[in-house]
Image (cartoon, rainbow, N blue to C red):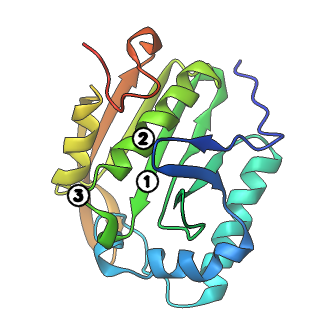
Amino acid sequence: MLELNFHPFPTLETERLIIRKITFEDSQDMLALRGNMDCMKYIGKPVSTKLEEVQELISRIQDGLETNSAIGWAISLKNNTQLIGTIGFHQIEKPHYRAEIGYMLLPQFWNKGLMSEAIQKVLYFGFNTMKLHSIQANIDPDNKVSATILKKFNFVSEAYFKENFFFNGKFMNSEIYSLLNKSHLLNDNSGYLLS
């Protein structure tokens, strides 16, 4: 079984980003992220409207860290500590050496390669430090941008579930992407998987 220890917290760094611990000081920025309709369009969860809602989320993220059952990071630019996005492994299946990755970024930071930069570093951490065998992503099939990013890192679509998810009064589809541990092909600082 996978043995994990997120203490001390693993802060990650890329060329432009600090990928750090989420704290209650990030509450207002987290509300801006989780309250943004464009960010939440494909998430399948209610848009946050109150500070208390994101503070409950931050508490759950911290609980996951305490029990070594999940890990979430804030994404910040190196020259600014503001939370501009989040990334993490929110579901870890220790007996199967598998985790689910999730990520979000404020719209004003889209199309700059920042999320690819963050994903690259987190994948490297997941495979090389956590010793995961596989990483999956569960996305709304209509989220073409997320699918494109996953394919860029050689994730493969493994399953398409029709109307398996009920949200906001309607049944929605889900698509599962997966990447096996080929960490010997992962370049820690290039931002890309080598083929």
Q: Residue 88, image x and y in percent?
A: 54, 47
Label 2 sits on a secondary structure element that is: helix
Residue 186 seen by the camera: yes
Which of the two discs, 3 and 1, labels the residue nearer the N terminus? 1
Which three-letter amino acid code belongs to the residue tagged 2? Ile
Q: Residues within 10 Å of mark 1 (few under 14, many from 20)?
A: many
> In which quadrant is the N terminus drawn?
top right
Quarter the C terminus occupies: top left
Per the rendering, the mark at residue 111 is 3
Sequence-wise first label, 1 or 2: 1
60 to 95, vertically: above or below: below
Inter-mark Cα distance, 2 to 3: 14 Å
Q: Is residue 164 left or right of residue 98?
A: left
Residue 141 visible in rendering: no
Residue that lies at the very extreme toward the front in this rendered image: 79
For the residue pair 119 and 177, the one nearer the viewer reads as 119
Q: Residue at x 46, y 14 (%)?
A: 183
Residue sticking out furthest to the top: 184
**Residue 24 location in percent, x, y?**
73, 74
* Foreground disc of the pair 1, 2: 2
Q: Residue 103, labelled with which disc? A: 1
Between 2 and 117, the one lying in front of the other is: 117
Of residues 12 and 158, the one nearer the viewer is 12
Amino acid type, residue under disc 1 in the picture: Tyr
**Position above or below: 151 against 82:** above
Q: Position of residue 174 (x, y in %)?
A: 27, 49
Q: Which residue is label 2 attached to?
A: 119
Marks 1 and 2 close (CB-CB < 8 Å) = yes
Secondary structure beneath disc 1?
Answer: strand
The part of the image, by quadrant, that contains residue 39 is bottom left
